[in-house]
Amino acid sequence: MSSRFKDSLRWVSDTLELTPFRITIIYVVFALSLLFVSDILWPRLVTDSEQLRRLQGLKGVAEVLATGGFIYVLVNQRQQQLQRERSFIQSAIDELGDIFYVITQDKQLERWNKRLPTVTGYDDSEIKSMRATDFFQSGDRQRVAGVIETAFETGESLAETTLLTKDGEKHQYAFKNARLERVNASDRIVGIGRDITERKQREAQLQRRTRAIEEAPIGISISDPDQEDNPLIYVNDAFVDLTGYPREEALGRNCRFLQGENTKQDRVARIRDAIDAQEPVSIELRNYRKDGSMFWNHLEIAPVWNKNGEVINYIGFQRDVTERKQRQRQLETLDRVLRHNLRNHMNVIRGEAEIIHSETSGEMMASAENIINTSDRLLELAEKERAITGQLRRGPDLKEITVEPILQRVGLTMRSEHPDATVTIDCPTDATVQAPPELEYAISELVTNAIIHNDSSSPDIAITVTQLDESTRIKVADNGPRIPEMERKIIVGEVKQTPVYHGSGLGLWFVKLLVSQSGGTVTFEKNSPVGNIVRLKLPS
Ligand SMILES: Cc1cc2nc3c(=O)[nH]c(=O)nc-3n(C[C@H](O)[C@H](O)[C@H](O)COP(=O)(O)O)c2cc1C
């Protein structure tokens, strides 16, 4: 058939969108028309036998042409369809995120998708001359060859190994092979390789974390709040060691089994409220081991959220603080007894000194007065020590405090106790800080210090408060002599309080403690022309 004729047929076929069904219909209509014209209509119109014979010849030619065209168009249709399917399959395979390959029995690559050159850096002509095992480190090649042979023998095989790129980069890959059985031809292996580098890294990270949790030196427990009564679903070795409950006895139960008759119910209620509110909680409470022995548990519980903001687990950290608690108790008792005795004996000394003071004169009276003043200072010191140890024992209990009213109260007290002093306050009425309630005592300490250590006849104290976005600054400026350097350094943490140096400024120490507990800072500056500026920066 001439190429022009073929082109015309293709054009007709494409323009008319000739499907095999349409072609068959056209062919049947054409054949019936030919039959009607040549066998029925024409013999009635034409009687000449010579013309009838020619007509039969023409009819034969038309039939051959029509049948040939019909067969050609059908075959052409089929070929186009196959071509379209083949390119569709190829582009689908090319678009795969995975490597696709076909391997011959001598481990040569016969087909592959675009992903293989993209990942390995070899171009198609290089790949053509490579064996499948060439994409791996020399130490892995034998194993990879074995995996391919297994697929030929058994029909399938799997392997996780390191793919080596042309640049020497290593990627973790998982390969899945299957045997492709072919009629009258040797079998092939068809396979897919998937990059599992990230998965492997995640697995390794998870393994490290799991090991860290399992081997952590404190008890770790995880509960599932989606189950009835929030039971434990995981406990680590330290939990088992601490509580004496074997894992199988702890899992599946709510952790309250550690509580006993002397566990304070208000503490349990605080845990319950925190869990109900999906908030973290940190608490110390009495717990009991399996053998019934009591221990102080420093318990911290925190909710674990998923990406959708739902609590999926609670994690608990258990620490045995019994020894520390006992030491703390002993120190507290010692502290109480010491302070009690100090107060009693100082009051006796002060009382006696008052008698001497009232009954003597001159040097003796002055000495008695000295004893009275020193006793007062010691009693005051004992009070400050009580405030500090109390604050240390309670720990930070931050509240939102409106600053202005407490400054006004401090100002009022100072003006009445020290009529010569001027205390000015400049504070926005809505300024707040996050601090323990004892902040008022700390500010009163600062102002008292500024007044009593002031050698001017009219101590001048100015308190200024400014509120910035996330912090509130309280500035206390005075016109007295500078706070001794050692005192300042101890407060800002430049010098450690050693047994050799005991700063007498317990008041300042208390200020520092309180500000640190609030997450704030204390700084000192020189005031101009004389005096100090103490700046407190507290979260608002
Ligand atoms: C993960 C997790 C760990 C817990 N660990 C302890 C614990 O070690 N000791 C304890 O007394 N309570 C622990 N609890 C608290 C109790 O399980 C329970 O929530 C608490 O007793 C308050 O609830 P209840 O009033 O229903 O008992 C833990 C809770 C959770 C969620």
Image (spheres, grey):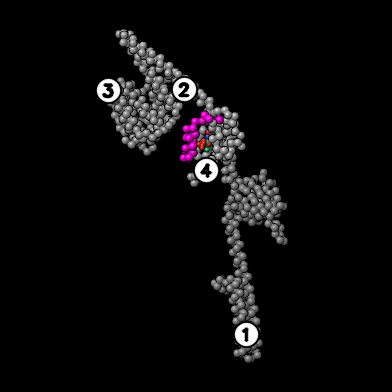
Q: Which residue is mark 3?
A: 420
Residue in the picture at 68% in, 49% down:
147
Q: Which of pointers 4 and 3 lies earlier in the amino acid sequence? A: 4
Q: Which of the labelled discs sits on residue 38, or is there none?
A: 1
Q: x, y (%) of residue 507?
A: 38, 24
Label 4 sits on what residue type?
Ile
Q: Which residue is mark 2?
A: 332
Q: Nearer the viewer, residue 428 or 122?
A: 428
The magenta span reads 261-288
Q: Which of pointers 4 and 1 lies earlier in the amino acid sequence? A: 1
Nearer the observer: mark 4 or 1; the answer is: 4
Residue placed furthest toward the bottom: 47
Classify 455 as above or below 58.
above
Nearer the observer: mark 1 or 2; the answer is: 2
Q: Nearer the viewer, residue 282 or 179?
A: 282
Say whether mark 4 is within 8 Å of ligand 1: no
Instruction: Give the Cα distance between marks 1 and 2.
Output: 127 Å
Q: x, y (%) of residue 490?
A: 42, 24
Residue in the picture at 60% in, 57% down:
93
Q: x, y (%) of residue 231?
A: 55, 39
The answer to whether 199 appears left or right of 348 in the picture is right
Q: Which of pointers 3 and 1 lies earlier in the amino acid sequence? A: 1
Quick check: marks 1 and 2 in contact, CB under 8 Å?
Answer: no
